[in-house]
């Protein structure tokens, strides 16, 4: 391990691409990460639900925001992780990066769904409707579709290397398109409905609310990383099982 | 290289004309969907005129989607796609030729059919020129973005449905700006918002002319190896 210190950053980057090393390292990280996420989310929930004031406009419903805002943040962060891992996979042929991109997609989709669900639950008492074709909500819904398409592409192509390449192209095309889609939705929204809906960027956040929001944000990010590691480990093992099965089948066919 | 490009384009056009089933079927589908609409929402002429631009665009998107799987699938199955990749033409230009052929045989007939269907939906007269302009600008984007989806799903069984699911989110800007140009509230050519929509639609189309060949070629490389 002493030799590790003399490695350049790039070499170290490649050193962790070794799945065996990744498995050894992540095996030690998973348990502490679980404990840490549970603790931080637990503390965040306590502040969010009991030890923070109700909003002077929104009342108690503001507490939904402590789940909603971090989910929405992770919905975008998840796509970022996926697109970055896809780019690394396409350029460097990093064996773990497509495992990472594949594992990040369902987690990101889950947080996107959570953001849509909590937004809808919050919208009912605040706007009086479960769904509003508001620019934000519409673009998050489209982000959800992009996640689903990506997952569907992985599920359809059987051979992992080919699936990884195709999915990486899709993730990158999506990453380029997201700003365009987002802009067009905002344009569409302003064209069709003048600013009548409630705007989020009204009053700035009170410090008493910033604490639970920050804790939940950190906690959700930790949870994302934990789930990502767990899913990546499962995916590496799944591929090993697949290779073993193929080898056994090949040996049986020959013998 | 130019000769190879033109030869490929001419081959695709000839195939589309002689085999049929491409553009003609898409136009037929377009017609049927538009005829279903008044049956669904009632024959109220004012209401139909109001929803006409949006419905024409949505039906056009669906009709264009239906023909996407013909873009590479047939060539993949009979092996000519493998031959093409070994030829003089870079993969990106192959995608350009294919998408251009798709537009000429599917996008263009749909645009020509659109005003007739507009009559069925009681589209107001002043909306025709901006809508036609928007469709002429926007449909190439559908073919070029669609090429990415078709290339991603080449060689997959029942890939057509998957290609539609992958491509539809990318069609959203075309839909929004396309309808924006023809919408009565935007004022068409004379209104500020209508002109802006047309300009933005042009920008989206130009961007997709770049993104489509690059993404499509990368996807083909992933799938053909």
Image: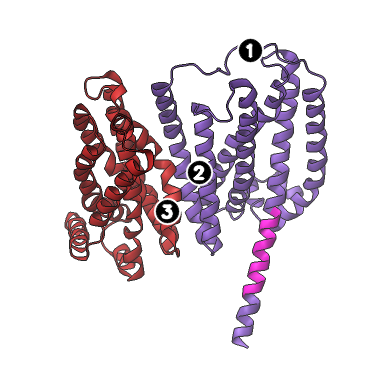
Chain colours: A purple, B red
Identify the residue shown where x is 81% and y is 37%. A38
Q: Pointer 2: residues within 10 angstroms few (<14), some, or many (20+)?
A: many
Residue B163 is labelled as: 3
Mark 2 to mark 1 CA distance (whole Å)? 32 Å
B70 on left or right of A99: left
Residue beneath disc 2: A146
Residue B12 is labelled as: none
Picture quarter containing residue B177?
Answer: top left
Q: Pointer 1: residues within 10 angstroms few (<14), some, or many (20+)?
A: few
Picture quarter containing residue B80?
Answer: bottom left
- Which residue occupies the foreground of this view, B89 or B165? B165
Q: Is mark 2 on a helix, strand or loop?
A: helix
Q: Position of residue B66 (x, y in %)?
A: 35, 54
Above or below B52: residue A165 = below
- Which residue occupies the foreground of this view, A6 or A104? A104
Does mark 3 fall on the same chain as mark 1? Answer: no
| A42 falls in the magenta region | no
Q: Where is residue A54 in the image (x, y as percent from the top left)?
A: 74, 16
Identify the residue shown where x is 50% and y is 38%. A142
- Which residue occupies the foreground of this view, A47 or A220? A47
Number of residue marks: 3
Residue beneath disc 1: A204
Q: Which of marks 2 and 1 is nearer the N terminus?
A: 2
- On the question of residue B188 being in view, the answer is yes
Q: Where is residue A208 in the image (x, y as percent from the top left)?
A: 76, 15
């Amino acid at each position: 391990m002493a030799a590790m210190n003399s490695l350049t950053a790039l070499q170290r980057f490649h050193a962790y691409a070794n799945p065996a090393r990744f498995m050894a390292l992540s095996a030690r990280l998973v348990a502490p990460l679980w404990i840490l996420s549970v603790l931080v989310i637990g503390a965040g929930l306590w502040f969010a639900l009991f030890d923070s004031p109700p909003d002077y406009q929104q009342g108690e419903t503001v507490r939904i925001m402590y789940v909603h805002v971090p989910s929405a943040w992770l919905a975008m962060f998840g796509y970022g992780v996926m697109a970055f891992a896809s780019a690394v996979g396409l350029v460097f042929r990093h064996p773990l990066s497509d495992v990472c991109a594949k594992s990040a997609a369902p987690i990101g989709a889950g947080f996107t769904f959570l953001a849509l669900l909590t937004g809808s639950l919050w919208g009912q008492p605040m706007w009086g409707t479960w769904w509003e074709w508001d620019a934000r909500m519409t673009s998050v819904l489209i982000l959800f579709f992009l996640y689903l398409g990506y997952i569907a592409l992985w599920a359809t192509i059987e051979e992992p290397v080919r699936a990884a390449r195709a999915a990486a192209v899709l993730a990158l095309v999506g990453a380029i398109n997201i700003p365009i889609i987002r802009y067009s939705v905002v344009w569409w929204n302003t064209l069709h409905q003048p600013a009548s809906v409630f705007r989020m960027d009204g009053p700035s956040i009170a410090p008493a609310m910033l604490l639970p929001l920050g804790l939940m944000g950190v906690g959700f990010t930790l949870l994302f990383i934990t789930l990502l590691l767990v899913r990546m480990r499962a995916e590496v093992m799944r591929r090993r099982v697949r290779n073993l099965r193929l080898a056994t089948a090949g040996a049986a066919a020959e013998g | 290289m130019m000769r190879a490009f033109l030869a490929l384009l001419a081959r695709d056009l000839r195939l589309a004309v002689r085999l049929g089933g491409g553009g003609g079927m898409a136009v037929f589908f377009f017609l049927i969907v538009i005829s279903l609409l008044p049956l669904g929402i009632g024959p109220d002429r004012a209401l139909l005129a109001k929803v006409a631009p949006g419905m024409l665009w949505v039906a056009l998107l669906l009709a264009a989607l239906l023909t996407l799987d013909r873009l590479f699938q047939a060539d993949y199955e009979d092996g000519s796609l493998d031959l093409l990749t070994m030829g003089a033409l870079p993969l990106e230009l192959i995608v350009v030729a294919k998408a251009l052929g798709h537009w000429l045989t599917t996008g263009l007939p749909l645009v020509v059919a659109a005003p007739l269907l507009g009559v069925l939906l009681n589209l107001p007269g002043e909306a025709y020129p901006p809508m036609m302009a928007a469709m002429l600008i926007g449909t190439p984007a559908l073919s070029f973005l669609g090429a990415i989806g078709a290339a991603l799903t080449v060689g997959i069984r029942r890939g057509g449905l998957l290609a539609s699911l992958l491509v539809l989110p990318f069609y959203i800007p075309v839909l929004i700006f396309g309808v924006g140009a023809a919408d009565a509230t935007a004022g068409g050519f004379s209104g500020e918002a209508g002109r802006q929509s047309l300009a933005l639609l042009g920008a989206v189309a130009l961007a997709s002319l770049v993104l489509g060949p690059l993404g499509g070629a990368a996807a083909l490389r992933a799938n053909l190896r």
